Amino acid sequence: MQPTATLNVFREMLANVHRGEWKIGSTIPSERTLINDFGVSRIAVREALSMLRGLGVLDIGHGRRTVVRRIDSETFGRLFPIMLSSGGQRTFDQIFDVRIVLESRSAFLAAGQRTEAECDHLRALCARFREQAGQGGEQALATDLEFHLTIARATRNPLYAILLEALMGFIAFAQRESCRNEPLRWQRAVLAHEAIAEAIAAGDAERARAEMEGHLRYSATRRLDRTAGPSAKSAS
């Protein structure tokens, strides 16, 4: 299915913010100007603007002028599901490329910086995940995400956790859509989490890195059903 006019305008507007053509705190062009610039209907422009306001990228300022807001990690978390639905498999693959680099390094650093309390917490999360993985669903997903975030925090570099939190909206969405009927993936995720936690607890940085990379590379082999829309069927 081809992108709609509204989605195309949404992407272009978001690109304007990313490139700095629409600067943080500035007023965006008038509705009439946007219609002329993008060559689309008033409805498409208004719907795209509404999407960006809903995501927190744009805000209605004084005098009802629309201004560009600073994009934070929460905004990114809301943007990633839209990116996935519009970009499909390509966006999915690109995000996993980032995760592999980010989280492999997180596991490596965590092995040298973690506390005993964090090791105990990782073990508890592994046990909980093992119990929940058979049913999948929201509880297992929440435990999965907490496991990865705990490792990022154990690096003692706050940027790892901040960046991973920015990806959380996408990660949760992707797992819901791609692991619904694949119990084998959940079981492999259980074993991978336990191996990663063991390596971190042992202080084996290189093994922790390798286990995390292998885990995420396997997760990245999922394929989204682009014909099924929001109910596509195919754990991090």
Image (cartoon, rainbow, N blue to C red):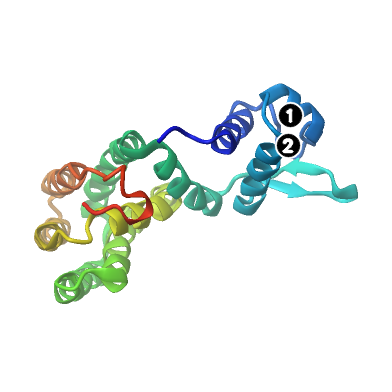
x and y, in percent, of residue 208 in the image: 15, 50
Residue 154 visible in this rendered orientation of the protein: no
Instruction: Tell me, yes or no, whether the two marked residues, 1 and 2, touch with CB atoms within 8 Å.
Output: yes
Q: Which mark is residue 35?
A: 1
Residue corresponding to mark 2 = 42
Q: Amino acid at mark 1?
A: Ile
How packed mark 1 is, by other alpha carbons closer than 10 Å (few <14, some 14-19, many 20 or more), is: some
Residue at horizontal 27 percent and vertical 70 percent from the top: 137
Res. 192 image quadrant: bottom left
Mark 1 and mark 2: Cα distance apart in space? 6 Å
Q: Is residue 147 above or below residue 64?
A: below
Estimate the x, y position of residue 52 in percent, counting from the top left: 63, 45
- How many neighbours does mark 2 have within 10 angstroms: few (below 14), some (14-19), or many (20 or more)? some
Q: Secondary structure at mark 2?
A: helix
Q: Is residue 16 placed above or below 141 in the rendered structure? A: above
- Tell whether 12 sits left or right of 165: right
Percent x, y of residue 104? 23, 44
Give SS at disc 1: helix
Q: Quadrant of the N terminus?
A: top left
For marks 1 and 2 on the same chain, the one whose residue lies earlier in the sequence: 1
Residue at 70% over, 42% down: 46
